[in-house]
Image: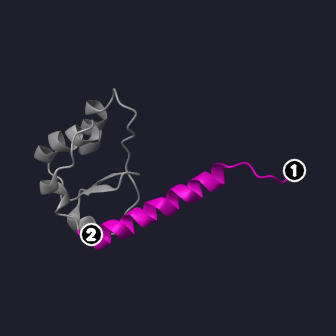
Amino acid sequence: MSFKRQLQAELADTPVEVREFLCVGCCPRAPNIVLYPEGTWYTRVQEEDLPEIVEHIRGGEASSRLTDRADPEVRALILRMLDRYVERLAAAQTPSDETV
């Protein structure tokens, strides 16, 4: 089972949305899981890491064993990219004040 499907199954009873996202240039560190908007970035995720990630999503603490793998500068860049994506998405979904 793919990570995405496994996470969707494990988190089906939560409001968490599990989805694939565009490439952010971190393929050498893949697979990556970003909890957004919280900002936790898990990189080089392996199947055996998923229980700790699910526990964190369900309200537990982030696993420093997993988060310490992430380069802080790359993490900050990815989060800025996600912020911008969300801003653009929201702007595109906001009805215009102009009348036709």
Locate residue 2, reporting x and y percent: 24, 42
Query: Mark 2 — residue?
Result: 72
Q: Residue at x 68, y 49 (%)?
A: 94
Of circles 1 and 2, the one toward us is 2
Q: Residue at x 20, y 58 (%)?
A: 67
| Residue furthest top as drawn | 13
Query: Mark 1 — residue?
Result: 99
Closer to us: 39 or 19? 39
Residue range in magenta is 71-100
Locate residue 34, reporting x and y percent: 32, 53
Disc sitting over residue 26 in the figure: none
Q: How is the image coloured?
A: one colour
Give the CA distance from mark 1 to mark 2.
45 Å
Locate residue 35, reporting x and y percent: 33, 50
Where's the N terminus, which quadrant?
top left
- Occupied quadrant, residue 31: bottom left
Q: Is residue 20 left or right of residue 63?
A: right
Residue 74 magenta-highlighted: yes
